[in-house]
Image (spheres, rainbow, N blue to C red):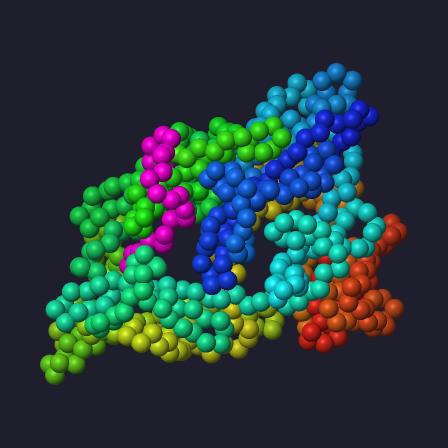
Amino acid sequence: MSGCCGQGSVIISGSAAATPRVDVEAVLLCDVLADGTVAGLALVEPIYDTNTGARVGTRIVEPTTGATYTPAGTLGVCGSPSDQCARQISTRTRCDDTNADGTGDVTYVEVWALDPCDGGAPQLLGAYRDGGFAQPYTPTAPADCPDATADTPVVLGTVCYDAGGGATRTAAVLKCAACGDPAVTYLDAETGATLTAPTIVPCPAATDRSTQLLCDVQADGSSVPFLRTFTSDGTTTSTADTRLDGVTAYSPTGTVGVCLPANDCASPTTPTTTVGLCLADGTPIAVTVVRDCNGAVTSEGWINLTTGTFSAGAPPAGTIACGDSRSIQVSGTFCDVDQAGDVVGLVLVEYKYAADGSIESVRLVDATTGQTYTPQGTITVCPSGTEQPEQDLVVLCDVAADGTVTAFTRDFRRDEAGAIVGFSDYTLAGAAYTPTGTVGVCDASTEEIDHLQLLLCDTATDGTVTQFLRHWTVDNSTGTLTAAGDTLLDGTTAYTPGGSVGACESCARQVIERCGCDDTDGDGVGDVTYTELWAVDPCGGGAPELLGTYLDGDLTKPYTPIAPVECTAADQPPGPLSTGVRSVTGTAVQDLAGTYPGLQSVSLAVLSDRVLVTMSDGASVPVPAGASLTWSVEQEADTALAAASFAGASAAASYLLNWTYR
């Protein structure tokens, strides 16, 4: 954290040659084949020189053994777990005056944990020598570091390029942050290799795959559960049926429908969580407990608050109250799968790194006992579990006197003790419904139609966002998907979108800074500046929450203002620069000067076709593909760029914009 009123993180250099060291950033990726299946896991380790910041190499290893791994397909992110209130980690570089000459001669890094939701004070996790997190360090006389600017590359975005032989790969686009060179560099996203003038091509559309659990109901009333996988390439949709192992082909012989629960209380109530615990490596977790239909409370498992991963059973051995730091890195939970496809154990992979950043040893740990684990089959990603139905929603059938069957949804209401105090009935489309016949559990053979709904956002041209529900019906015997209309969030009022329809953005709470001034001598003018940390809810509408106040942005110096006043121009130093990056395709106008009145600089990299650029002289100038240009304020009297507008010459135009503003 830089702090808007104090000095931020810096890097110092001395006259003596620095001891060569490397830093490793491990990223766990999935090796995905062309048909969408996962061939294996790979641990990608970019290696950096900690003295120069230069990337010196890349290793790709097998995560359970540390051996070199060769991808069979394309490496990508295995999933996208998220947690809106996960603790956030921030680092801060400081200096230690070990020879008492008033100047810091040893650099070290502090690692802090911030809690954006519960309002807890920032917590110092540890201090480490020169950023080497394997070397804990205890400072003797912390002092301010001399100013220095690192020539650090900035990632502008990613593009796809022609790798030859009909293959398409992904490249990261980087640019020097501090130097005046306008050129950009392309790095292969998997290998880290530098690319020379790659041919930029459109990225291929991803195949959309989804799987649904269905039941094949036989004539004698028994049912066989199986998986139906829907695969869509954006134009056509195909289906494939398999056993629950996801591999063995299956052909239904009876009536296909939704698998129904055995009774109205087949599932426990919504779990509650207990937080404040951490794994041995410092990862925060929440222990979940549930109450069954009889009111009995049992422990169900625990959730990794960093990744959102749920694990059944007790937390691993070594779980303690959050606060202690650990040096050994532990992966997520894997499964030990035998030759029959059954899961015979839950496993954690523990990594220990040598001084040069390489993997020194790998240990498999039993996820429930914490003891060393001996595999009985193959250690791999755990198979997807069966999704449980909502406890308080159940589909029932209204049987009329003439035998007509109408399926509807009954929503039970509960009090604080979990007792049912009432219910409401709705049609499968969400409208209010009143039964007229005999209500009972539906016969599985008649349950051939299912109802799906999805929360979407309608964005108007003025930026106004309206949330609504889109409904579909699914014929479970044929897999046919039919649109059933749009409604407001009440599920009954019809709604017609008028803008751009898409997925709603994430509403995670955000931590922001604010500078304040304190009038300690009572003269009406602030003479002490301090920083306030606020947690803001961008979607829920909750009031901003003050997390704490600190002197000069230093998390080690909590500060309580005596007489807060508005900061004058003399009190308030220039605000920190904010940055933005945007990948644009097509002819839509990008008026950065109009959108950001405090625009300080703009960098343009044309990837394909031409881009029409309009600056303060008013003339529109075409810039061809392959060109990179930068505009910025140069004189102290310049407060911002007066004009900066960009538009593609045609729909095929593609370019990157990177800008700074106050």
- Residue 429 colored in magenta in the image: no
Q: Residue at x 29, y 73 (%)?
A: 476
Q: Quadrant of the N terminus?
A: top right
> Does residue 215 appear in this view?
yes
Magenta segment: 367-390
Q: Residue at x 15, y 65 (%)?
A: 222
Residue 63: % across, % down: 49, 41
Depicted 361 relative to depicted 170: above or below: above
Viewer-proximal residue among 304 and 197: 197
> Magenta segment, principal secondary structure?
loop
- Residue 379 colored in magenta in the image: yes
Residue 251: % across, % down: 27, 69
Depicted 344 relative to depicted 261: above or below: above
> Does residue 317 appear in this view?
no
Q: Is residue 195 left or right of residue 135?
A: right
Residue 23's image quarter?
top right
Q: Is residue 312 left or right of residue 444?
A: right
Q: Residue at x 40, y 73 (%)?
A: 238
Viewer-proximal residue among 258 and 339: 339
Q: Is residue 137 left or right of residue 151?
A: left
**Residue lying furthest bottom:** 402
Residue 544: % across, % down: 54, 49
Residue 199's image quarter?
bottom right
Residue 278: % across, % down: 43, 34
Count of labels in the image? 0
**Residue lying furthest front:** 165
